[in-house]
Every structure is written in structure tokens, then in C-alpha cells.
């Protein structure tokens, strides 16, 4: 018996865009567009008018619309039952990036940047793949997850005090902004080592994501700058369209380097070069964390980290919007534990403090 299709609502003031998105989505038999509306007011009314069992699981919400814009409609949609996962559509501009991060803070599950005509518009295969992955992933994961419960320890012990930990590297893609948010909230405080992170995101969006993460009260966050010394207690995010590398200094410190080298895994920034550079600079005193995302970026970098004696942690399948990147690491036997972001935070704290700490719910790889 075939699975029940994911129910989707399209909310965009352009009739042409709604028609194109509906055609794109319904080409996949696992998705059904149940409602198409032209503004936020119509979206809220149409959602409430449907029987509960027929209501959309996912709402694709444009932010700029007449009558009622997306930001006004967002909290009204999130009050509906059953609560939908809302994916906001944003322009590839600084204004669009700022509005997107505001929507994520207000409860949106994710975002999707509208492709420009130069990249093929809505017909762009990369846009289609990202859209389908996010719609299906958020329908499966749901708009919110309960906090994980205490459970199993790491398969391997945390780094010992004798070896220490010099740096943490995090990689993520599809669903990554919310996973990073949950992870940093789980940490709750700055760490005694620097963190470097790669999130697959367009240029301009990463600055807004860094600002968003900096507000969470954990490690301070900013986009990395070429040549700056990496400080304990800070998170350095790779800027859009630049690889982030790490170099070691003679005095034992670490320095960020930005690179315009060709994309890897079709991505720039990419996780693999960041993790390879960390491993080269720090040897086995590295903790790599791979969060939700499409593809397998991070796999080769994790091989380098594990080969040097470092630790590798990965997000579990149940909490991942797309279990591509963490799944590749897990299937290769590199992940020492699989956990939701909150549980990964506990293990990061354990490694950073070099003493055992209980894990939250998860399964050993």
C-alpha cells in the first residue's frame, strides 16, 4: 500500500508562482497540494475551514504579500491544530535574509530561497530537490520535537584530560538552522574551546544566521574573518560562498582562513575542507559533529578526524529533516553516537569538560 501523500498549502500572491510550485510538488506522488491562496488572511481562513484530518502538514509561506503578509500570518498559522510546519520563501537579498531569520525566531520550521532567473528560476533542479526534501522532511519530523530523555552513553569514551580538546567542527545543510539553534540552546554557555561551523547557505544569509545564533545565550557567534585568531567560547560560521579553513600557529593557537577554492560536493562553503583543515591543525584533539543535511558533505572530513584519533558525533535519523550527511557518516561506521541535537549538546559538553556526562535519548551507531 502506498504511503499517504504529504498535504501542502501554497501561500503566495503570484498566481503564476502558485501554479508552478503546485506542478513541481505534485510531480512527486508523495505530495498533494490541498490549498492555494494569495495572502496570509486567506491562508489562515482556508486552513481553519478544512476538516482536521485534511489540513496541511506543511505550509509554504511567502513573506511579502498584500492584505496580510507572511510575518503577520505566521503566528496565526502556528496556533492552528494540528500545527503545521511552516517553510517561508524568501528573496536572495539582505532584506530577505533578515526577514527569514525573524521568521525562524517566530517559529517557522525552515526557509527556502526563491531562485533567480539566472539560475533557472523555479525550474532549477537544485531548487526542486531542496524544496521536495524540506517538504517531506518537515512533514515527517513535525514542526517541533520533545526534548530527548536520558539514555545511553557514548560507544567510546570522551577525550581524556591528557589529550584535551582544541576545537569543535560542525557541519549541516537542509534543516540545519533549527538543528544548530537546538544544539546551541542545549549547550547553554560558552565552551573552553572554539567552534567552527559550516551551514550550506547563500551569501548574505550566513551573516543573518550568525546574528540569530548569537542571540541564543550560548557561545557567541559571528561570521569568520580571514586571518582572525579563534577564541575559546566563540562560534565561527563560514560565510556564504567561502570555504572556512583552520590553520595552526606555532604558539598552539588557531587561525581562520577563508578560501575561494572550487566547491566540494557542489558546495561552497563545504564541510569536508573545514574538517580536513581542523584535523591537520589539531590532530586527534578535534570533535566533529554532523547535523541534518542532504548529500554526504562531511564524510571525507570525518574520515580524516577519526583517522587522526578525534571524535565524530552525528544527528539521529528520527530528528533529522534529511538524514543524508549524518547518515553517510553513520553508515561508514565513523559516528560514535547518534542523537538529536539536544543530546549531542550533552556529549559536546562532556568532551569539552573532559569528564563523563549523561547522554539524552539516542542510539549508538
Image (cartoon, rainbow, N blue to C red):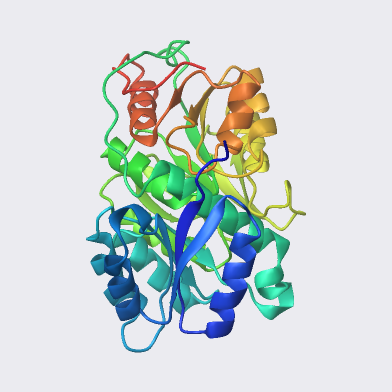
Would residue 221 be found to the left or right of residue 172 on screen? left
Q: In this orientation, which residue lies closer to the viewer: 306 or 114?
A: 114
Residue at (32, 64) in percent of width and height: 50
Q: Residue furthest bottom?
A: 66
Image location of residue 262, percent across then percent down: 77, 54
Residue 179: x, y in percent?
A: 41, 44
Most extreme residue toward the right is: 262
Q: Is residue 109 above or below residue 103?
A: above
Q: Quadrant of residue 157?
A: top left
Percent of width and height locating residue 60:
45, 66
Q: Is residue 228 visible?
A: no
Front residue of 11 and 53: 53
Judge whether residue 275 can be spotted in this image: yes
Labels in figure, total: 0
Name the residue at 42% across, 36% down. Answer: 319
Image vertical order of residue 10 relative to residue 216, above or below: below
Q: Quadrant of residue 151?
A: top left
Question: On the rendered image, what quadrant is the N terminus found in?
Answer: top right
Residue at x 47% of width, y 44% of height:
230
Considering depth in this image, is 201 or 275 the residue closer to the camera?
201
Q: Is residue 290 left or right of residue 72?
A: right
| Residue 130, percent from left and from top | 60, 56
Looking at the image, the residue that sits furthest to the front is: 1
Amino acid at each position: 500500500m502506498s504511503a499517504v501523500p504529504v498535504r501542502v498549502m501554497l501561500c503566495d500572491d503570484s498566481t503564476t508562482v502558485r501554479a508552478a510550485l503546485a506542478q513541481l510538488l505534485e510531480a512527486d506522488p508523495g505530495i498533494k497540494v490541498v490549498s492555494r491562496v494569495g495572502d496570509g488572511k486567506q491562508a489562515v481562513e482556508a486552513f481553519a475551514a478544512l476538516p482536521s484530518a485534511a489540513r496541511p502538514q506543511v505550509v509554504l509561506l511567502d513573506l511579502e504579500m498584500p492584505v496580510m503578509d507572511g510575518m503577520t500570518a505566521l503566528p496565526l498559522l502556528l496556533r492552528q491544530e494540528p500545527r503545521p510546519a511552516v517553510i517561508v520563501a524568501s528573496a536572495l537579498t539582505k532584506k530577505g535574509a533578515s526577514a527569514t531569520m525573524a521568521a525562524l525566531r517566530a517559529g517557522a520550521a525552515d526557509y527556502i530561497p526563491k531562485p533567480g532567473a539566472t539560475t533557472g528560476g523555479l525550474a532549477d533542479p537544485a531548487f526542486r530537490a531542496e524544496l521536495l526534501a524540506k517538504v517531506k522532511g518537515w512533514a515527517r519530523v513535525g514542526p517541533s520535537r520533545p526534548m530527548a530523555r536520558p539514555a545511553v552513553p557514548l560507544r567510546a569514551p570522551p577525550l581524556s584530560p591528557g589529550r584535551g580538546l582544541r576545537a569543535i567542527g560542525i557541519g549541516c545543510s537542509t534543516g540545519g538552522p533549527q538543528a544548530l539553534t537546538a544544539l546551541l540552546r542545549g549547550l547553554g554557555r560558552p565552551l573552553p574551546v572554539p567552534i567552527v561551523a559550516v551551514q550550506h547557505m547563500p551569501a548574505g544569509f550566513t551573516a543573518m544566521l550568525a546574528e540569530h545564533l548569537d542571540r541564543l545565550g550560548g557561545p557567541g557567534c559571528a561570521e569568520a574573518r580571514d586571518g582572525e585568531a579563534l577564541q575559546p567560547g566563540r562560534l565561527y560560521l563560514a560565510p556564504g560562498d567561502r570555504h572556512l579553513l583552520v590553520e595552526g600557529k606555532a604558539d598552539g593557537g588557531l587561525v581562520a582562513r577563508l578560501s575561494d577554492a572550487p566547491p566540494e560536493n557542489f558546495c561552497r562553503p563545504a564541510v569536508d575542507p573545514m574538517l580536513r583543515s581542523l584535523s591537520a591543525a589539531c590532530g586527534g584533539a578535534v570533535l566533529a559533529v554532523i547535523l541534518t543535511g542532504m548529500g554526504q558533505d562531511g564524510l571525507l572530513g570525518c574520515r580524516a578526524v577519526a583517522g587522526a584519533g578525534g571524535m565524530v558525533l552525528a544527528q539521529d535519523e528520527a530528528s533529522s529533516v534529511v538524514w543524508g550527511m549524518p547518515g553517510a557518516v553513520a553508515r561508514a561506521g565513523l559516528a560514535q553516537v547518534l542523537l538529536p541535537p539536544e543530546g549531542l549538546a550533552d556529549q559536546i559538553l562532556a568532551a569539552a569538560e573532559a569528564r563523563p556526562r549523561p547522554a539524552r535519548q539516542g542510539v549508538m551507531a
